[in-house]
Amino acid sequence: MLHLQNINGTVLRLFLFLTLCTDFRLSAAVDTMAATDTIKDGDTLVSADGTYELGFFSPGNSLNRYLGIWYKKISNGTVVWVANRETPLNNSAGVLKFIADRGILALFNGSNSIIWSSNSSRTVQNPVAQLLNSGNFVIRDATDTNPDNYLWQSFDYFGNTFLPGMKFGRNMITGFERYMTSWKSNDDPSEGDYVYKFDHTGFPELFLTNGLSVLFRSGPWNGLRFSGTPELKQNSIYTFEFVFNQEEFFYRYKLVNDSVVSRMLLTQNGLVERLTWIDRTAGWNIYLTAQMDNCDTYALCGAYGSCDINNSPMCTCLKGFVPKYPNQYDMADWSNGCVRKSPLACGKGDGFKKYSGVKLPDSRYSWFNTSMSLKECNVECLKNCNCTAYANLDVRQGGSGCLLWFNNLMDIRQLTENGQDLYIRMAASELDKSSGILKNPARTILGILVLMGALLLGVLLALYVCRKRRQKREVISLGKMGSGMGRDGSESHKDDLELPLLDFDDIAEATGYFSISNKLGEGGFGPVYKGSFSDGQEIAVKRLSKDSRQGLDEFKNEVICIAKLQHRNLVKLIGCCIQEDEKLLVYEYMPNKSLNHFIFDKNRSKMLDWPMRFHIINGIARGLLYLHQDSRLRIIHRDLKASNILLDNDMNPKISDFGMARSFGGNETGANTRRVVGTYGYMAPEYAIDGLFSIKSDVFSYGVLVLEIVSGKRNRGFHHPDHDLNLLGHAWKLYKENKLLELIDPATWVSCMIPQVARSILVGLLCVQQSPADRPSMASVVVMLSSESELPEPKPPGFFTERKPVEIEFSSSNKEICSGNDFTLTMLEPR
């Protein structure tokens, strides 16, 4: 009996020992959690080096419980990451465990409801969760430690803390963003008022915002640092880098010495601070702040104003500019900024003035090229009347790359160190005043000698040209081609416009004598051919067909319109040719053809992910804004459609085919015509029915384009099994049923960003409203696409009533009246 009792006692002690081992296994200093483990309130994981700890905590004076990560070795209680920051536990009954067979971690409350979980697009057979020495909490396969194969990681989900090794930026393929958000208070880690993230509308830079208000920006990266953060330089504490390629862009820093502890914090007061731990004082020390002084307040001095913290007052207008409202400026109200002393006169002596040692302006409305030189940058900016300034993209090794601005220059400040050179467009008179040539006799003499040499060279060159019998490119005056631009009753354009006249034989040779193998397509004008000049320049040639519905008027109209327009989102006209019956237009070649080549093709549409489609939507909008508002002539295109949007090598959209365009002067925005031109499916109701056209007609066409780009479906010819509505009607129906996301092209599901897609659809619906007065201007469209402000409720679109099958059959067969999306329609005598 005694022997049996000893055995039973031994078994009992063994059972109790195993039970205790199981209950307290996670309480020991372990860093990994297996698929069958759980973490309860009081249990923790500790990184292998003992730096970080994961478990449940209550911040400040709060009684709520959160799952988080904090420093363990030093400053115990300084939290760096919170899982359930928006859904706190109100007691200590929380449990963290894996969801069986899914490899997903979930946090359960006392009612066994999930209040937070990780997410992953794939699963593994044997998942584990591990707290790394970096502070990164990861989920991976138990046998795979490759970071590229993590199922999930906390480093992808920032809070108010930016740790070493984290990637702060955006994945350009998936659209996933990593950014900082403040806590509401020391007692509440839920998302506060402040957000610090990259804006990639133009060249990426960091913006600190409070709601819709911009408080601070870092300036664009210049190869060494962000332009507005001169204090960011080599040091003994950390290294840093900015990576920007086609797949992603991000900022990251690493500690030089593991014994040094440093982190970045976005406080609930909106300050971006770098903190380092000081063992001697056992506290955090502010190493630096992103906002150095009052001059870092965004746009404090307004447009074309410059802030210098060492001056009083700190805000002044740049040289060549004066306060827009002098009285306000004198009273330290600088918000309305400055205006030019002398207005620009594009093509009449405009040049650039160099401003040194500055923080570069807001780059959200900029364009950049990484391979251009500063001289090429100058040329590119000078030939575009909307370009207001340029600078080097990278300041290393003497400078490289090009950054161009196309709007008012905002948020410039003078820096005492590590500032950059900025070249601002100025009127010729301002350049003369600032040149200082007359103050230097030696320079004056040198200038005269240079001028005399240039004149002599010009005379010799003129004599050579006169002797040369045949030139590849001559210049003709289009004003001599005949009076009048169109047959709509508009006044004739009498201004002579110079444009290179190319030799027919050269064009024929370049296109292989209009070989069928070089034929790119055919429109209402005639066939289009690909060609290449002897110097390697690739071209696209439109050849007026003898039986074309378009004639000399349209030919002249396109030349006159597009030759006066210069914008990155408009196709560039290289020259033209008129020889006997031949009429040719020569353009820059667009290797990716037209937009409809992609979006309406089942296979090629997969090449257009959502970020690319949104880029195209924005580019078309900016091109139209230039036509309607910013060009020297106000242009109404009248035939905007997918086949008239060409795509360059980088998939930048360019509006083409101005044969049907109308130009206006002054404040004119529309007219009436007896000759309706355009394409069914894109024409606004008031234009197709009554011949009334305006800039709002183009807005309607743009709205159709947006909905086509989002859905990958044509408006005209759209069919749905549940109704006989066109694409506009279908989109409106989904909007009314709160099912907008059903409109998305399946080819973009993986990459689409839901808020951005939904906003684009709403903008499209606003543009296609029945009444022109209800449609927004293109200026408003550009703002709506780039902001996060609330959009107005759209009204029903035009041309969306349900069609009868017999009407569909009749309209699709009546080829004398209608045209498909690939052709331009000309219809006489509308009612």
Image: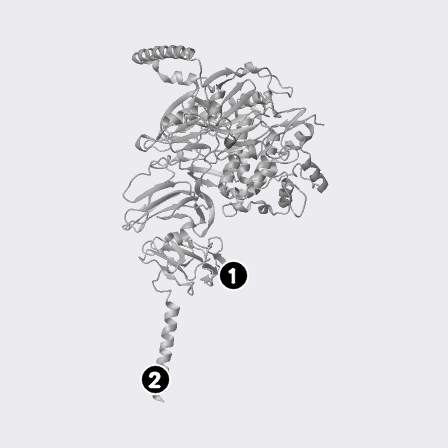
Residue on which the image places disc 2: 6
Give the quadrant of the N terminus.
bottom left
Crowdedness near tag 1: few (<14), some (14–19) or many (≥20) residues, C-alpha within 10 Å: few
Q: Secondary structure at mark 1?
A: loop
Q: Nearer the viewer, residue 422 or 748?
A: 748
Using the image, tell me which numbered label, if any, was put on residue 113.
1
| Quarter of the view holding residue 522 | top right
| Quarter of the view holding residue 472 | top left
Which residue type carries mark 2? Asn
Using the image, tell me which numbered label, if any, was put on residue 394.
none
**Marks 1 & 2, CB-CB < 8 Å contact:** no
Q: Secondary structure at mark 2?
A: helix
Total marks shown come to 2
Q: Position of residue 802 (x, y in %)?
A: 69, 41
Does residue 324 appear in the picture of this structure?
Answer: no
Q: Position of residue 623 (x, y in %)?
A: 52, 30
Task: Note whether 810 is above or below 665 in the view shown.
Answer: below
Task: Note whether 289 is above or below 135 in the view shown.
Answer: above
Q: Nearer the viewer, residue 99 or 783?
A: 99
Residue at image coords 36%, 74% = 17
In three-dimensional space, the C-alpha distance between marks 1 and 2, rounded to whole angstroms, equals 46 Å
Task: Note whether 272 is above or below 388 in the view shown.
Answer: below
Crowdedness near tag 2: few (<14), some (14–19) or many (≥20) residues, C-alpha within 10 Å: few
Sequence-wise, the earlier of marks 1 and 2 is 2
Q: Position of residue 756 (x, y in %)?
A: 52, 42
Give the quadrant of the C terminus.
top right
Does residue 141 appear in the picture of this structure?
Answer: yes
Q: Position of residue 364 (x, y in %)?
A: 46, 34
Which residue type carries mark 1? Ser
Q: Nearer the viewer, residue 316 or 794?
A: 794
Side (left or right) of 84 relative to 547: left
